[in-house]
Image: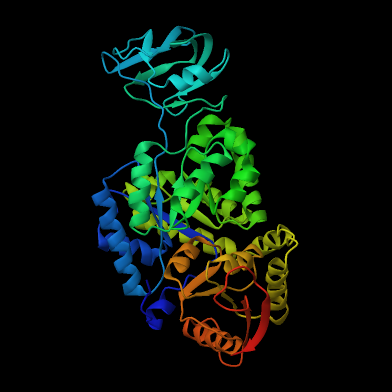
């Protein structure tokens, strides 16, 4: 699938920041008009939350995004975030109870509606995996229970922190690895729909083990990038291998913040971002970034600092969830996030931190070429690095270096261009296929002028793999005069 070329529209919408913005669509942002305005305001990637909405709803939003993409001639990424296994208690006879701190409370397999002494837990795997002194967190961690006795069909617990508990509230089990696959039957149906609809990334929830990623990648079969959501403490135990297998990463601070002590979450975020950067995998920081803007037209100072911290850490993208999906001020939320990101990236301290935290090149010719391209661009103050890429790997390698100048990602594949929408510093363009070094240089010159990245007489850096149209290695760097 190709995109039409209308350079004027493309120039108008070239972002002058490196860190990308992901915006979630929902009831407050369903129409083509609203999605268009969110895109114009600064959204680079749109997230579809498959925990809510029908396939018909999501299909309509995908069609709107592709329509906007053609209109503005700018590749737009679509993230399909599948729900994953949701662990919940059953129902109560009165719909709601109040658990007192210190009381006993039973969780069992009996489907009878519960009361203040017991409730159904329709997940025998939790009962099997729990141990004495394991903790269960209910309703996003508002209530905490400790296991005191265990039987084949129930758990006896002590209420450590009490409070109101109503039907179907969520259960988190931070202490144990649960023998539950990351993909439920619902997820598999949603996944096949999303892949057939042509989304660009699959958000994989509830990842605990490397095997979860392998399974999702086998199903996707290259049709989309797998973005693993790190939201379980167990994923942190296998972090390096999970990220190595994944195509992209999300720091999903919602459930992660429930299952980890609050003081551990910032450290986990920095570790995840650092590891993803080291491996050259795009990383998104998500959840509650501008939470107060669901109901307020401006963020708190702490929220602004939170977004800035993610940018300083080197995240590829920052994400808005309910702020744009259901909030009262979706455009203002995207606008202020765009302003915060842009302001941080203008700060001299941001560049110093970015340079100081740059990972060492790995021992490959491709990484050496990408590193050399950044160094040459810095030395001659090149206005752009043109990276020719079929699969996106060359652009990813250059982005890992965090160069001073923008990265012009040139690819014959619309699918690759869309996937690069989440990658730091990359302005992707769907260009014609090339067969020679001369064609590559000419195309890099032409596109850099069209995109208003370079002026006649300036010098750009060209990075590619030769022979062309064969993936597998970045082996050429060249200085070209525009």
**Residue 455 percent location from the top left of the image:** 55, 88
Q: Farthest bottom residue?
A: 457
Q: Is residue 110 left or right of residue 152?
A: left
Res. 354 image quadrant: bottom right
* Quarter containing the N terminus: bottom left
Please name the residue shown 65% across and 61% down the image: 350
Q: Is residue 89 above or below residue 306?
A: above
Judging depth in this view, the residue of 69 and 164 nearest the camera is 69
Q: Nearer the viewer, residue 171 or 226?
A: 226
Whether residue 107 is visible here, answered yes or no, is: yes
- Residue at 33 percent across and 44 percent down: it is 189
Q: Position of residue 412 (x, y in %)?
A: 47, 75
Q: Position of residue 60 (x, y in %)?
A: 25, 57
Residue 198 in which image quadrant: bottom left
Q: Nearer the viewer, residue 328 or 387?
A: 387
Quadrant for the C terminus in the image: bottom right
Vertical side of 50 occupied by 371: above or below: below
| Residue 237: x %, y % from top left | 64, 36
From this viewpoint, is residue 143 visible?
no
x 36%, y 78%: residue? 4
């Amino acid at each position: 699938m190709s995109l039409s070329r209308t350079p004027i529209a493309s120039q108008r919408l070239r972002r002058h920041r490196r860190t990308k913005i992901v915006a979630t669509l929902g009831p407050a942002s369903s129409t083509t008009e609203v999605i268009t305005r969110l895109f114009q305001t600064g959204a680079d990637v749109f997230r579809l939350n498959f925990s809510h909405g029908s396939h018909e709803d999501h299909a309509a939003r995908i069609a709107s995004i592709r329509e906007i993409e053609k209109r503005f001639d700018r590749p737009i990424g679509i993230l399909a975030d599948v729900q994953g296994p949701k662990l919940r208690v059953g129902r109560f006879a009165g719909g709601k109870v109040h658990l007192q701190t210190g009381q006993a409370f039973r969780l069992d397999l009996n489907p009878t509606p519960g009361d203040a002494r017991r409730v159904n837990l329709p997940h025998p795997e939790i009962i099997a995996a729990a141990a004495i002194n394991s903790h269960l967190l209910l309703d996003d961690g508002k209530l905490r229970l400790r296991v005191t006795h265990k039987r084949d069909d129930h758990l006896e617990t002590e209420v450590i922190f009490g409070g109101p508990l109503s039907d179907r509230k969520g259960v988190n089990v931070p202490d144990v690895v649960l023998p539950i696959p990351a993909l439920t039957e619902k997820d598999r149906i949603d996944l096949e729909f999303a892949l057939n609809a042509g989304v660009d990334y699959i958000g994989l929830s509830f990842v605990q083990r490397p095997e979860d990623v392998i399974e999702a990648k086998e199903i996707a079969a290259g049709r989309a990038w797998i973005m693993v959501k790190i939201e379980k403490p167990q994923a942190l135990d296998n972090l390096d291998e999970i990220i190595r297998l994944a195509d992209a990463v999300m720091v999903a601070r919602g459930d992660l913040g429930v299952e980890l002590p609050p003081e551990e979450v910032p450290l986990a975020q920095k570790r995840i971002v650092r590891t993803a950067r080291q491996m050259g995998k795009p990383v998104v920081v998500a959840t509650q970034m501008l939470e107060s803007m669901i109901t307020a037209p401006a963020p708190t100072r702490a929220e602004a600092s939170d977004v800035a911290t993610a940018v300083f850490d080197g995240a590829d993208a920052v994400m808005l969830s309910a702020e744009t999906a259901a909030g009262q001020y979706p455009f203002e939320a995207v606008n202020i996030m765009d302003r915060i990101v842009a302001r941080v990236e203008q700060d001299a301290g941001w560049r110093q931190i970015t340079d100081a935290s740059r990972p060492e090149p790995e021992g490959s010719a491709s990484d050496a070429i990408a590193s050399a391209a950044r160094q040459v661009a810095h030395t001659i103050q090149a206005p752009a690095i043109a990276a020719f890429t079929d699969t996106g790997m060359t652009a990813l390698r250059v982005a890992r270096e965090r160069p001073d100048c923008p990265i012009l990602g040139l690819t014959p594949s619309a699918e690759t261009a869309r996937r690069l929408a989440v990658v730091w510093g990359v302005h992707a363009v769907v260009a014609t296929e090339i067969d020679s070094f001369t064609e590559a240089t000419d195309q890099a010159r032409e596109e850099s002028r069209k995109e208003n990245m370079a002026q006649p007489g300036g010098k750009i850096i060209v990075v590619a793999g030769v022979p062309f149209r064969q993936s597998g290695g970045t082996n050429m760097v060249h200085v070209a005069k525009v």
